[in-house]
Image (cartoon, rainbow, N blue to C red):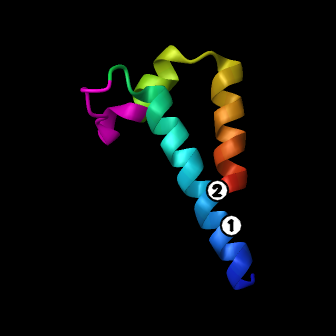
Amino acid sequence: MSFSSNAAHDVASAAVADAVRAALQTTADTPIDPSTAAEGVATSASTAERDALSTLLTHVT
């Protein structure tokens, strides 16, 4: 993979990570606990949402 591809991948990965954090964040002043974030997604998201997120993360990471 070339340098520019790695840089694009890093930017995309960071953007997805930021989007996931924002989606999981309930309020601006409540930090996300990484140990429970995945559990929160699993319990609150529909199957379609989980599948879409899983597919997206698989392609980006």
56 to the left or right of 35 = right
- Cβ atoms under marks 2 and 1 closer than 8 Å: yes
Spot occupied by residue 58 in the image (x, y as percentages of width and height): 68, 50
x, y percent for residue 32: 31, 34
Say which residue label 2 marks.
12
Number of residues whose C-alpha sits closer than 10 Å to that of mark 2, classed few (under 14), some (14–19) or many (20 or more): some
Residue 31 horizontal/vertical position (percent): 26, 33
Q: Main secondary structure of the magenta part?
A: loop
Q: Is residue 16 left or right of residue 58?
A: left
Three-letter amino acid code at the position of disc 2:
Ala
Q: Please give the range of residues in magenta.
A: 28-37
Q: Amino acid at mark 1?
A: Ala
Residue 61 in view: no
Residue 8: give its label: 1
Q: Secondary structure at mark 2?
A: helix
Quarter holding residue 61: bottom right
> Residue shown at 33%/32% (left/top)?
36
With 8 as the anchor, is 18 left or right in this view?
Answer: left
Distance in Å between CA atoms under marks 2 and 1:
6 Å
Residue at image location 59% in from the left, 65% down from the top = 10
The relative height of residue 40 versus residue 17 in the rendered view (above or below) is above
Which of the 4 image quadrants contains residue 55? top right
Residue 12 appears in the picture as rendered: yes
Residue 53: quarter of image? top right
Secondary structure under tag 1 reads helix
Q: Nearer the viewer, residue 50 or 1?
A: 1
